[in-house]
Amino acid sequence: MINSYRIVFKFWAGFCLIFLNCSISACTAPSLSSNEKHRVCSDDAKTVSGACRVSPIRLLINSDVFSGGIVDVVLFYPGMGSKFLFVDAAAADVADLTSAFFIADDLDVQKIFPSPGYYKVEGAFSTSAPIPFGEGVVISEVVGGRFTRIDVATKVRVKGDMVDSCKIEGCRVIYAEGAYLVKVLPVN
C-alpha cells in the first residue's frame, strides 16, 4: 500500500514539475533581433505618418518590441492632472499603474489632454524603468512604458456619447458593416 502511494506521489510530482516548466516557458517571450522588431509593424499597420498602429494590450505586453518607435494607440486619460494614460477607464478607476503608460514630465498634460476620456495618441514610445513615488515610503510602480513625445492626441467619441447625442425620434446608433459606430437618422 505504501509503495502505491509513493508511485502516485512520484507521478503527480513529476506531472506538476512538467506542467510548471511548460507554464513558465510559455510565459517567456523570445527575444527579437532588431530586424524582427522592425517587422512587427507591417506596412498595413502603419498610419500615413509612419506610426505603428497597435492595440493598448499589445503595446502593454510587447513594450520592448515597440520601444524607440512611434506608435498610434487608443488610451484612456483620467483627467485631474494625471501623468498616466491607461489601457481603459476601469484601469484608471482603480489606479492600476501596471496597465498604464507614463507621460514624460516635460510634456504639458493639460494642453495635450484638455478633458478626461479616450484619446487616439500618436507619439514616441519607450520602455520604462519602475517609477518611484513618495519619499521612498511607497514602493516603485512598474508601468507599461512611457511616451517621451506626443505628436497627436485626438479625443475619441465613444458609443455612450453617440447614443446620448441621438436626440431626434427614431435616431439610433449601429455598427455599420459590423465594425464602425454610426448614427442612423430616420428618413422622412
Image (cartoon, rainbow, N blue to C red):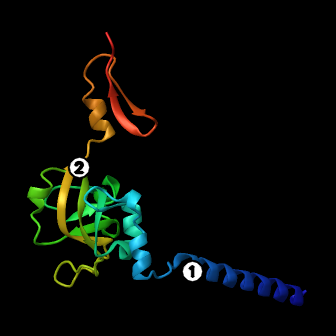
Regarding mark 1 in the picture, which secondary structure is present there? Answer: helix
- Position of 149 with respect to 169 (left or right) is left
Q: How many marks?
A: 2
Q: Earlier in the sequence, mark 1 or mark 2?
A: 1
* Residue 138 in picture, x, y percent from top left: 24, 79
Is the C terminus in the top left, top right, bottom left or bottom right quadrant? top left
Residue drawn at x 19%, y 55% as measured from the top left: 153
Regarding mark 2 in the picture, which secondary structure is present there? Answer: strand
Quarter assignment of residue 100: bottom left
Residue type at the position of mark 2: Gly
Are discs 1 and 2 less than 8 Å apart at CB? no
Quarter assignment of residue 90: bottom left
Residue type at the position of mark 1: Ile
What residue does disc 2 label? 117
Marks 1 and 2, Cα distance to the nearest angstrom?
37 Å
Identify which residue, 110 or 176, lies in the foreground: 176
In the rendered image of this protein, does residue 84 appear above or below residue 119? below
Q: Is residue 55 visible?
A: no
Identify which residue, 138 or 107, lies in the foreground: 107
- Position of 146 with respect to 16 (left or right) is left
Is the N terminus in the top left, top right, bottom left or bottom right quadrant? bottom right
Identify which residue, 1 or 127, lies in the foreground: 127
Q: Which mark is residue 6?
A: none
* Residue 157 in picture, x, y percent from top left: 26, 42
Q: Is residue 158 visible?
A: yes
Question: Local crowd at mark 2 within 10 Å, few (<14), some, or many (≥20)?
Answer: some
* Residue 186 in picture, x, y percent from top left: 33, 16
Question: Local crowd at mark 1 within 10 Å, few (<14), some, or many (≥20)?
Answer: few
Identify which residue, 7 or 27, lies in the foreground: 27
What residue does disc 1 label? 24
